[in-house]
Image: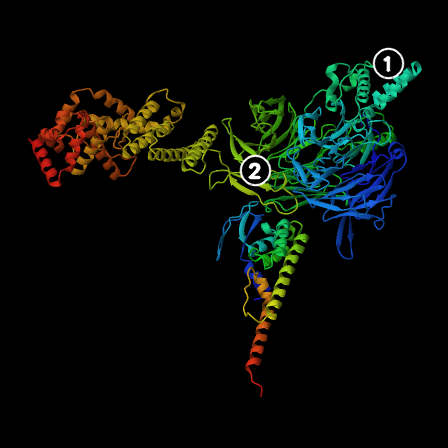
Amino acid sequence: MSSGFSNIKSLQNVGIQKICIDSSGKDRENVYVCDSEGAVVKFSKNSLNGSDFPQTFELGDSTSASIAWNNDNLCVGYSIIDYITGSDKKAVGNVKNDEFDSEKIRNLLEFQLPITTIDINDKYLAAGSSDFSVKCKSLQGGDGDLKSIELDGEPVCVKIDPKNEYLAVASVDGLITIISLETFEVETTIKDVFHRFESIDVSNPLVSITWSKSGQKLFVPSKNCVKVIYRSTWQFAASKSFANVDSTEIFSTSAVSQCGKYLAASTMSNMIGVWDLDLNELLKTEQFSRNAPGKTVITSIEFAPFGKAGDLLIADSNKGICIFHPFEDKLEEKEENNEVSKVSDDEDDELVLSRHKKPIFLDEESMDVDDNNSRLSSTSMDIAAIKKNYGFDKPADIGALEEFGFSVGPADPSYERKEEEFTKPQVSAPVDYIPAPRKIMVPDRFVCNSSPMEVSQRYLKYNQHGIVKGYINEQAKTNTIDIEFHNKRIHGDINLDNFETNYELADISLKVIALASFESRRKEKELDKMGNEVNELDGENDRSEKKGTSELLVIPISSFDSQRWTITLPRKDGAIDVLVSETNVVVLTAKRNVRIFTISGVQRQIFTHPGPILTAACFDNRIAIASVSGSEFYEADNKKIAQWKFEVSEYRLDGRDWYKSSDILKDARLPISMGESLEWLSYSTHGKLLAMDSLYNLYMHQSSGLWTPIFDGSSILRSQSDGIFPIGIADNDAKKIPELRYIYCRGTKYPLVSGINAPTIVPIKIPFCQPESERSKLEHELYWNELAMAESIQEDDLRSVEVLDKLHSAALVKLFALAVKCNSDGRAADLAQLVGSSERIQMLVKYASKNKKLVLSDKVAEIGRQLFDEPSSSSRRKYEEEELRPTRKIVLGATKKLAEKVTPPPEDEEEEEDERNDSQADESLIFSQPIIPVERVGQNPFKRNSAASSNNKSVFDQLEQQTLKRPNCEEPVTAKKGGGPPAKKQAKLAFGGESKKKNEEQKENLKKAVVVQQEEVIPEFVKKSVTPYDLWLSESRQNLQSEYSGEDSEFSKFCIQQFRALSKAEKDEWKQKAQQQQQV
Amino acid sequence: MNAEKCEFLAANQQIEIIPRISEKVVHLISGDVGPFEAGIPTKIPVWMALMLKRKHHCHIVPPGWLAIEELKKILISESDNLGLSHLPDMFFELSHMLVKEASDNIFEVDQVKSLIQDIYDKREAKLRTSAITFLSQNETCHAQLDGVQPIEVASSRATLEACKQMAILIRNKHQSTPI
């Protein structure tokens, strides 16, 4: 406990406590504290400071920490159950003369649900309830009129304007509603002042708003600051916020001193700040802390009506109330100075006293705007003199006083002498106002797959193997743990009494369950006491090592020896997290040690993690520990939010041969969205590391070192208050794509232990654009396949690589086909670049040719040549060398045969002729040139011949050979020697058939291909003499030319059209003529 | 048809369970159910879910409408509507079976029970008053009943039967001529 706090006085019950002082200021001796369990405690000055006992009153069946006091009217929100009728009544009762008997209480307001907040002044009583209604009653004129209004959110705090014009209401939906007291209609609603939350409890800020004494400002506790809402505009200005030293704090309570000069506020982490409203300056910050077990949050803060100026009353959720003296040291100094000044001058005495009464000078209420200038100037002079005494004599230090119409006037000559006397001893006074150094805490440590520690019923662990639930009932003094496997056939349910052991950490796997407890100071004290007594009895003086209080319990399941065992961890090195895998039990300790045990209890390793432990996960012999490194940093997009560099260290500790391994530790950065923090770290069932940030973006760590986004949880959240509680990722063998299992939590971040939480199962999905399109699906499949292949390659799992390679090719071919259909040749060419073998690229060439994408087929063939003929094409090819080698042999054999054996061309058919003409026509359209035989038209350069012998070349060698041979004029002669005139024909391709029939077909195809190849290099005049079209063209050219009047380049097209227009009989005639000519 | 038969029919409805065992597909006359993977929700008929529940082989996931918030909404709509509001199929039968046999799987089961009772009472009161109104007027001889649950039909069958008999008696009385 810091020196600024008095001794803690105990209250009746835990939970929200509300301190109440007389707002009229008449009673300056007593305060009331109301809790949520039906008790109202009256403290006097002596009972808080001294040893007097406070008075405790019981009111109704329960209260709801709502109380307000003005003069004789003490109003308390309470509920009372009528057991005869079975009805319960929630009302604001008016207690007079401390008569808390429910029969003597006069109910002023009634509600349907418990009252959450009350405020009262001399004119009005206002209260809000959980039924979302706010009611107000005028206290003047008998019963007065009752006004009511329904809000959209549960009111958490109501405050009546000191001018009795407005009622300010803060509600859980993050709104400040200003209600006119006269009409009781909403004047304005101010949004985004503080963050919304779900319910009014100790885990959420209580947002106790406060009006300034003048009513010109409304102070609202918010995130990072206490915001100031100006009455004139009903807008808050960030620049006028009172930022605390720690910018990540969430402010919960606030109070303005009765003099109106000071503002005090507390945060959810119990940091208390006191500001000077006039100077707009932070005067004091102090951390409130208690050693009592349980959660301690300041739930109420008020300026004490008694004692020294600025003293604060602080009540916390852990049954504690105390006084905080923020200016203790300074006042002592002042008192000392006072003594000195008393001796010197009587007038100085007045000034020193006036310093204590400084708030009275700055009292805004006393400073009426209509006051005459003389009074203002004298006040200003007073301020100037006081400020000089505090060292704020520079003009720039006037702070926010201009807002109040003040200016630094000429110093009163009468004060000048006094200043001389006072400035010297008070040189050190401003030191008190230097704000504490700015510090930002690293994100809190947490246990994955568990609920927060604060709740009484929580999941100690909920993972893919089972559930460990903890139930704490403080009233009944029971603490139990239920352990259940999802599959009860592994092991039946286990119930443990946890009252003595107090295990708060757990993990469960199919082989073992581990439970661990934190260190307990209370137990340590007891142990020390017992140890001392034993030593005294034994008469020993030597001090043995003190026993720790953190205990580990391990329950082996279906192992060789299923004996439970426990071990006590050393003192000051208690457990902070426990993890289990199929083989190990891992305990992370307070000294950042990682202790590894076998399931049966052998201590195997201990090492220290070099950094703060944020969370951890375990799989098999791998331990991943997440931590933050470096200091916080800020980005331009969000300058106010501190970001951290999250890292994960993965230790691979093979229980048997770990000392032989050189790469035990691997570090990786964690992908966390801007301004977010790590929410979950785990392994999939196949051992892939997973991380999720607080925006529910889930990432999977690939073996290649990449983090792949696999799930965007924020897109499925139906409400901002909803949460996703991930359970794990399991591989679905049927669908090949892993599935994420999570619990969707409505209105909370964690699943409730009561009731049944049905997990939701979704296949993980990489967020490709346009996910519903077929193309994106195939692209997703392709990428996922590559990721899986990368892992299999690293693991040297050749069998799965083979399977995945086939799937990869299938996806690639489908994508290629889609691109071809969509006439997206560029995309198709890109996809061809990804093909892993020549056979597959051959397929693509064939497909492109079939779809008459000649340019594409050329391009793909070129890509094939680049990829598979150049020795340094890619590393991938190296991997597939073995796969390619047999293919190459076959093709080489086939090429050799091609050179030797030349087959006669098959008979021309009319359809083939037409087809050829069509292709010619198409080409002529493309190139706008007269018909010329185009290279590789109708041929497949990648055609594979299964009849090939062992010494063959690859298809690309074939292509190269053709390209080289083409200018050779001897080749046509060879072709001509082989028999009749070659016919131009598209070669039909076949792949990899093993049957005899297929071989024969392939031989046929090979022959055709040879013909095609020969045909390509045959001189034009040879070919022209044999085709019926050419014959017809040569004979009817003159007629055609006379008929044709267009451009020369279009003439060939015209000719083809004319030839097509001929009747079948005429075509037959020309065909016969051509055959005859050939025979001749 | 009585309440038991209504429950028998309702037991054929599908309900989600979280199995605590792993099993292959079970082939039933009505169709295949499963496969079951421990901890992974699946849908099976209610009768089977109850059977597995009795053996502690599963947790039953209560339907969404069996939550307190939803029941409160139903109760409010029942209060607001003059007629009977539309409820999920076999509402009373299913809720009765689940509250009876899977109470540990229902969150705040006591409150759920009382809310269902309230809904039932409200509807029963509506049915009763509408029946009285119908019988007391002479102009029309037919009425339309929407959104009636099977169990309500079964429970009001006796009254309707009695009304029918009374109508026959009255008709006979009018038709008969005094001697």
The three-letter code of the residue at mark 1 reads Ser
Mark 2 or 1, which is nearer the eye?
Answer: 1
Closer to the camera, A98 or A677? Answer: A98
Please tell me whether residue B93 is drawn above or below residue A262 in the rendered image.
Answer: below
Helix, strand or loop under label 2 = strand
Q: Do the residues labelled 2 and 1 touch (CB within 8 Å)?
A: no
Residue A179 image position (x, y, % from top left): 70, 39
Q: Residues within 10 Å of mark 1 (few under 14, many from 20)?
A: few
The three-letter code of the residue at mark 2 reads Gly
Q: Quadrant of the N terminus of chain A?
A: top right
Please give the label number shown on residue A728: 2
Q: Does residue A26 show up?
A: yes
Task: Report the coloring of the rendering.
Answer: rainbow
Q: How crowded is mark 2: few (under 14 residues within 10 Å), some or many (20 or more)?
A: many
Left or right of A630? Residue A419 is right
Residue A376 image position (x, y, % from top left): 79, 22
Instruction: Classify residue A588 by image quadrant.
Output: top right
Helix, strand or loop under label 1 = helix
Disc on the earlier residue, 2 or 1: 1
Please tell me whether residue A958 is drawn above or below residue A1005 in the rendered image.
Answer: above
Instruction: Classify residue A678 by image quadrant.
Output: top right
Left or right of B10? Residue A303 is right
Please give the label number shown on residue A787: none
Q: Name the residue under label 1.
A: A414
Q: Does residue B57 show up?
A: no
Instruction: Classify residue A697 by image quadrant.
Output: top right
Tag 2 subunit: A
Same subunit, tags 2 and 1 = yes
Tag 1 subunit: A
